[in-house]
Image (cartoon, rainbow, N blue to C red):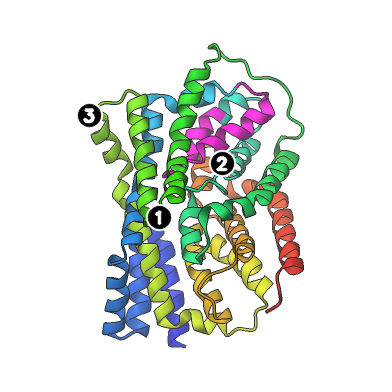
Amino acid sequence: MLMGSSFVLAVAVLLISARKYLWLGLVAASLILGIFNLSAVDLLKAVTGTFADPSVLLMAAAVGLIPVIGAAMETSGLMNDLANNLRLNTKVFLASSPALIGMLPMPGGALLSAPIVARSGSFLNDKQKTAINVWFRHVLVFIYPLSPLLVASKVAGVALYAQVIYLLPYCGLLIFLGYWFLLRNIKGQIEYESHFDLKKLLVSLSVIMAAPLVHLTLVTIFPGILKEACLLTGVSTSVLLAFLLGGLGAKSVKLIVRKMKPWNFALIIIGVFLFLNVFKASGAAMIISQMALPKVVLLAGVGVFFGFLTGRVDVAVAMLAPIYFLKYGRQAMTHLEFTFAYFSVFMGYVMSPVHPCALVSLQYFHTELKDLFKMMGRAALIALAVNFLAASLLLPSR
């Protein structure tokens, strides 16, 4: 009973604190679980083990820099160059602009694509524009290596770039469902005020793609080097390109750092792994793992709940993974198992009422949460049904 009560209290504190500072909520939730269920020595081991892990610290540094890329592109105008030179028909543009911008996760990032959706979809009602902005913002970030997949794959113990291949069919499913329910009846072409500039388009895309390309190249050429060191190098490359190609000076660095507060993002990563380590040591995962849940329900069902509850992919996977490891005596998921688990968590996150992208989009377009559920609900339910059916057919029962 103490274990259950402390777990509920920890999650409640996490959800309340996450509205302001997610990292603080993660630390507080970790301490609550630890104080009620661990000795002082074991809690100290979990804390020191997190801060002494170089892979966690390097990943935290890299993730802290990722929002700086988006802010530098926004400040320099590279983000506008990207949107203005995507010469596509209206349907494709409405899907691709939030999808491309969505590959740079940042606080309130949906506000970057919202004005573009509003301008190009001026003939749509606000409910449609809200749903398009939220849904398509997540179709590419779902497989983008520098997205929530980065942390989730490490927690689950799967290879990042190999996992991207497994997720591609689901990315296609998200695109198809978004098209069918949100874009199918839209027609027309967008009128641009300026001429197409291939150079500006390629420059903007190069900033976004440099980080994963450098990361993958270094990991492949130097397999013995800590992967997170390669990651930090790749992200740093994108940051430098954003400032150099965007023509930003030293003054811009200070303004962007002050605006984005990259340390908050770095602390979130440390908080996630602190919560994961304490969650494992506390025994909470053991109690949940002893429940008579079939594998398909745990991965394709419970994951949805965790994603919906927390509104965060990394936190939800940090809760789900240790339960799976204890229940099945494993240290890592297979790529197929992680595919079903990640997709279920991701869909719960996309539909979560505490999901920041949804909240800022609702505010921008002056719509209500019930309208968003109504617009995206059928697509989400179909996606989850497909995932559950596929998991039932392809996963072994034990």
**Quarter assignment of residue 98:** top right
The residue segment tinted magenta is 87-116
Give 257 or 50, whichever is nearer the viewer: 50
Residue in view at x 40 percent, y 30 percent: 74
Magenta residues, dominant SS class: helix
Kind of residue sitting beneath label 2: Arg
How far separated are the C-alphas under marks 2 and 3?
30 Å
C-alpha gap between disc 3 and disc 1:
32 Å
As drawn, is 342 to the left or to the right of 249?
right
Residue at the spot x=49%, y=70% of the render?
Answer: 319
Of the image marks 2 and 1, the number of the one nearer the N terminus: 2
Query: Badge 1, how many Cα within 10 Å: few under 14, some, many 20+?
Result: some
Secondary-structure class at tag 3 = helix
**Residue 210 shows in the view:** yes
Q: Amino acid at mark 1?
A: Lys
Q: Where does label 3 land, which residue? A: 251
Q: Is residue 91 magenta?
A: yes
Whichever of labels 2 and 3 marks the residue nearer the N terminus, that label is 2
C-alpha separation, residue under disc 2 versus residue under disc 1: 27 Å
- Numbered circle sitting on residue 227: 1
Judged by depth in the image, the label closer to the viewer, 2 or 1, is 1
Q: Which mark's residue is nearer the viewer, 3 or 1?
A: 1
Q: Earlier in the sequence, mark 3 or mark 1?
A: 1
Q: Is residue 173 left or right of residue 129?
A: right
Q: Is residue 279 above or below residue 231?
A: below
**Tag on residue 137?**
2
Q: Which mark is residue 87?
A: none
